[in-house]
Amino acid sequence: MKKIVLMASLAALPLGLAGCDKKTEAPKAEASADAMGDMAMPAEVKHGKGTGTVTAIDPAKGTVALDHGEIAELQWPAMKMGFAAKPEVLKDVKVGDKVQFEIDWDGKAGTVTAIGMEP
Ligand SMILES: [Cu+2]
């Protein structure tokens, strides 16, 4: 009878330790969440408008490439570059179209938020 009780308490020990481990891990998890919060500091998103020619569209990847003119709001010269774009934004344009467009630029990547044929 004593043996059984002893075994039971030994069996309970690892469980108790596991519980302690979880408690000591909790602050670490919070610290990393804070670090991620710092990294996720919202970059300043700039909005720009431009005109250009569509050079490629990849609806599956949700990208569009534009040979665009200057974009004053972003102090960009004319260039060819790719942007992210939702399929519904791209539905009315095709490669070769002369377009006007609006983009959001977060400092690293741009997203076309509106695009359509140049009037
Ligand atoms: Cu550009």
Image (cartoon, rainbow, N blue to C red):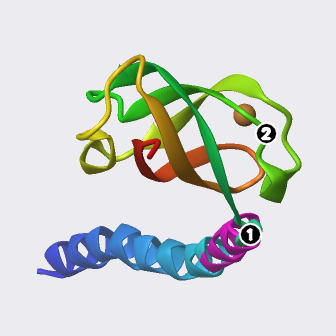
**x and y percent of residue 42 in the render?**
70, 71
Q: Residues within 10 Å of mark 2 (few under 14, many from 20)?
A: some
Is-magenta flag for residue 80? no
- Label 2 and label 1: CA atoms lie apart by 37 Å
- Say what secondary structure mark 2 lies in: loop
| Residue type highlighted by circle 2 | Glu
76 to 10, vertically: above or below: above
Identify residue for label 2.
70
Q: Quadrant of ligand 1?
A: top right
Residue 10 location in percent, x, y? 33, 71
Q: Position of residue 71 (x, y in %)?
A: 76, 47
Q: Which mark is residue 35?
A: 1
Residue at image position (32%, 25%) is 94
Q: Determine the main secondary structure of the stretch shown in magenta.
A: helix
Report which quarter residue 43 is drawn in.
Answer: bottom right
Amino acid beneath label 1: Ala
Q: Residue furthest front?
A: 119
- Is 32 contained in the magenta span? yes
